[in-house]
Image (cartoon, rainbow, N blue to C red):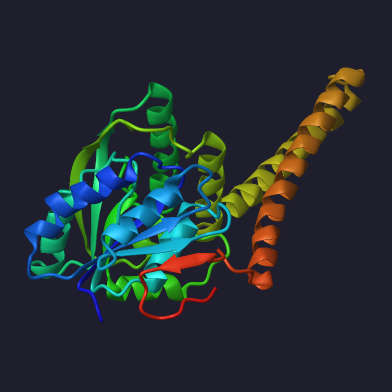
Amino acid sequence: MGKNISIIIPVYCNEGSLKITYENIVSQVINKWPDKNFELIFIDDGSIDNSYSELINLFHSHPDIIRIIKFPRNFGQVSAILAGYIYSKGECIINISADLQDPPSLMNEMIKAYEEEHFEIAIATRIDRDESLGRKLTSKFFYNIIKKTIFKTMPTGGFDFVMISNKIKNIIISNKESNPFWQGQILWTGYPIKYFPYERKKRIIGESKWTFSKKIKYLIDGILAYSYLPLRIMSLLGIILFLLGIIYSLVILINYFFGNIPFKGWAPIMILILTLSGIQMLMLGIIGEYLWRTLDQVRNRPQYLIEETHGFYEKIDN
C-alpha cells in the first residue's frame, strides 16, 4: 500500500502540541490534496513526558494515516529522521518539527516544487526566528561556519524543514555514517534546490531541547565529516611554528656574538612551553576526534533501537 507523500515528525518531549500539529497538517495540507495519499510518521525519540501517550491516542483516532515508531531512549533528532526515512513509503518525504514553529502550509509549495517543477529537494529557509538573541546568534554563528567551510549552499539560517524525493532518501539511507550530519547529506548530493524563506515562530508549548552543547557537537560532526580543514590548519600551524623557531634561533645566534642574549629568565621559557604544549594538545584532540569517528564507524552500532511500532503494514525490526 504505497503512499504518495510521507510526513516525518520527530518527537521529543512535545506533550501538548502533538494534536495541534496533526490538526494543522490535516487542515493546511492534507485536505488541500484530496487526490493524494498521506502518511504521518511520528518518531518518539525517548520522550520523558506524556508525548507517547498522546501519540497513541492520535493513532487510535486516525489509524489509517498515522504511523508511530518508539525509541527506548533518546537517540537524537537525526536518528529519528533517519528512522522515518527508512520506513516511509512516499514518493516524496517531508520532515517538519512537532513544536509548531514551522508553518505546515509551506508543505503545499514543496509538493508543487516536486510535482510541477521536478525538484528533488525543497528547503524551507529561516530568514528570521522569534527566539532569544542568544539562540539567534549561536545559530547564525553555527551555520555561517558551515557555509564558509563546507557547503556554500547552506542557508544562512540553516534548515530542518525540508522535502526530499525518494531518490534522495535512498542516497541518504545508503550512507551508513555513525555520526551523520543530516543537512550535509542532503546538500552533498548536489541536486538543484528550491528554497522557501519563512520566519520561524516562537515555540508556544514547552522548551527547546536543542542545547548549546548539542549544537557544538553537531557542528563538529559536520566539519569532521565533510572537511579536512582542521588537518590543513594543523599542517599550516606546524609550518608557521617551524619558521618562527628558525627565526628565533637566528636572533639568538646573532645576539650571542654581540653578547646580548634576549629574553633571559624562566618567564619566556614557561610561556613558550605552555603555548606550544597547548597547541600540541589541541592538535592531538583534533586527531582524536577523527580517530573516534573512525572507531565508531568500524563498530557499526545501530543509530537507534525500536521499542514499539504502530500502523505499519509490515513487521519492523531494528
Q: Is residue 246 left or right of residue 185?
A: right
Q: Is residue 238 left or right of residue 112?
A: right
Instruction: For the C terminus, give its image quadrant.
Output: bottom right
> Image quadrant of residue 85?
bottom left
> Image quadrant of residue 59?
bottom left
Give the answer, above or below, for where 136 lies relative to 61. above
Q: Is residue 36 left or right of residue 81?
A: left
**In this view of the protein, can residue 8 be seen by the observer?**
no
Give the answer, above or below, for where 278 lies relative to 286. above
- The number of discs equals 0
Q: Is residue 155 left or right of residue 285?
A: left
Give the answer, above or below, for where 9 lies relative to 264. below
> Image quadrant of residue 127?
top left
Q: Nearer the viewer, residue 219 or 303?
A: 303
Residue at x 49%, y 53% (from the top left corner): 45
Q: Nearer the viewer, residue 115 or 183?
A: 115
In percent of width and height, residue 308 lies at 50, 66
**In this view of the protein, can residue 99 be seen by the observer?**
yes
In percent of width and height, residue 141 lies at 43, 35
In percent of width and height, residue 222 lies at 50, 53
